[in-house]
Amino acid sequence: MGIASELFQITNSIKDNLWLGDISEIHKLINSLFEKINDEEIRRYIEASIKFRDHYRSLRKELKQEHKGLALFLNLSIKFNKRIQKLGINPRDSIIGANLEYIEKLKEKIRAVKEIIPVRRQEKYKYTLRRYKYGYEARAIIPDLRVVCTDKLKETLLKLKFQPWIIAETKSFLSSVAFSDNAYLEIVIFAPRMYIVLKILPEKVQNVERNIKSLIESQIS
Amino acid sequence: MSTSLHTLQVEILRYNNVISLRNVATNIFILRQTASTIATDLLSRQNTSILANLSVFPGLLEQYNIRYTEKWVKRIDENFLEYYYGLKPALNIPHPSPSQSASFPYIYHKFFSGDVSGMIAESIFIYFLDHLGININLIGHLRPMKQRNAYQPDYVIWDGSNAIKTLIQNPQFQPPLYAEVKGSTGGIDPSKISKAFTQLNNVLISNTDSGLAFIVFKDSQRVSYTGAIIEVTI
């Protein structure tokens, strides 16, 4: 169970970093994963995945001549199940292999990419900031965030002269909007992610990055 | 705007009978009959237990969708009226499709790619697992690894903690747990249940293996969603 659970945790972490746009962290995660599994093991899993896929495809092609719809799915599953058992192909290994294949492909795809957006790294969080025609979008990952600090967020918003409105919240999730005289904010927290959209009148833009950081930091315990 | 548009009421049921594929996935008539019986039971709440009553915010569902279902539709909550009335929004795939080399904005900001009910069902499934206390970082979503005409279950769950045992009655169960998720914005569709069983029949090979079919449907008044867990063994 060890390698599989680690593999899926790393895959989920890669997805978080894809969302943020942190390519260098994705490189690191992929490298750390491939350091933990030796090449022979990787090949074995990927081979299981390829065999699993190839046998499924060839059987499907064969059975498609005589069956359609549910009959095709049923006959295929019966024959496929028998075949993989006979050949000693374990679905568990093939799933691990498919995940490793996906990560290898992703690694290849991003090999030449150094950065898609600058990532600002702080001690307890990291974030990216994009500027759009009418505002900004910030995405942050706060690794230690488990429980949303609603009160601290409201307090920070009031300090920044925003009127906050909490739309929904659970322990690890918060959705809110906030208004000021010249700006509109939308904040979504889904631990460990925090997403902020700021729409602001162009002539009123000042201290945007500092204010966004203070909003993120409201969630640092 | 009424409260019902802000929250999605979802009752999660467990089908009390464990389905043995040895008995069911052998003959198309038995398979269809079993699926039809289960559908009738679920609609009439026979042979079922209530596992949870969830009140889900569409905005939260959106986050589960982004993180765990890989169909990065731009905002379930913005399109919620369409989902609510069971309408299928028009496809919103950029033309021409992005090339491999230009795929980063697409990865970062994927557009709607169809299959609304499946996406809602998958998001509800992950939300429910999270609600049960299952470590959602140990859940593998296999859609990105799917290749044309090749089978992969929708999810594998590698969590062996007690939380998972709420869902599984098989005393010999060993992780991973395989899951197939089916949804419809209309009533329950027995053919989707049958299909889920045949799909799980591709990967369940020993007594320690278990699978789940998670079926999401709306009631006849289209007021609320129901999710049903059906445990499957060989």
Image: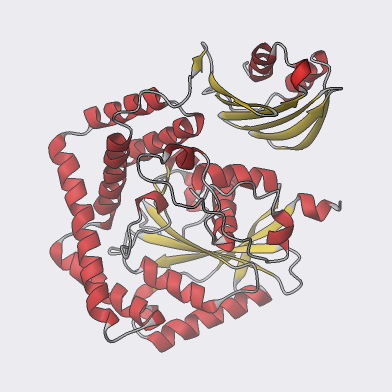
As rendered, which of B159 and B147 lies closer to the eye? B147
Residue A156 visible, this orientation: no
Q: Position of residue A33 (x, y in %)?
A: 28, 31
Left or right: where A14 falls relative to A56: right
State how many labels appear: 0
Instruction: State the residue at coordinates (67%, 27%).
Output: A148
Q: Nearer the viewer, residue B175 or A204?
A: A204
User: Is B100 placed left or right of A172 in the picture?
Assistant: left
Q: Which quadrant of the structure image shows residue B45?
A: bottom right
Residue B27 vs B91, above or below: the answer is: below
Q: Which image quarter is the C terminus of chain B in?
A: bottom left
Specify how the rendered protein is coloured.
secondary structure
Q: A156 above or below A37?
A: above
Residue drawn at x 79%, y 33% as measured from the top left: A166
**Residue situated in front as seen by the camera: A130 or A140:** A130
Residue B11 image-quadrant placement? bottom right
In the rendered image, the vertical position of residue B43 relative to residue B125, given as above or below: below
Q: Residue at x 44, y 25 (%)?
A: A22
Residue B232 percent coordinates (x, y)? 42, 67
Which is nearer the eye, B59 or A145? B59
Direction from residue B60 to residue A185 in the image, left or right: right
Residue A209 x %, y %: 64, 14
Instruction: Name the spot of residue B139 as percent of width and height, x first.
Output: 44, 45
Residue at far front of view: B96
Look at 44% across and 27% down and name the residue there. Answer: A116
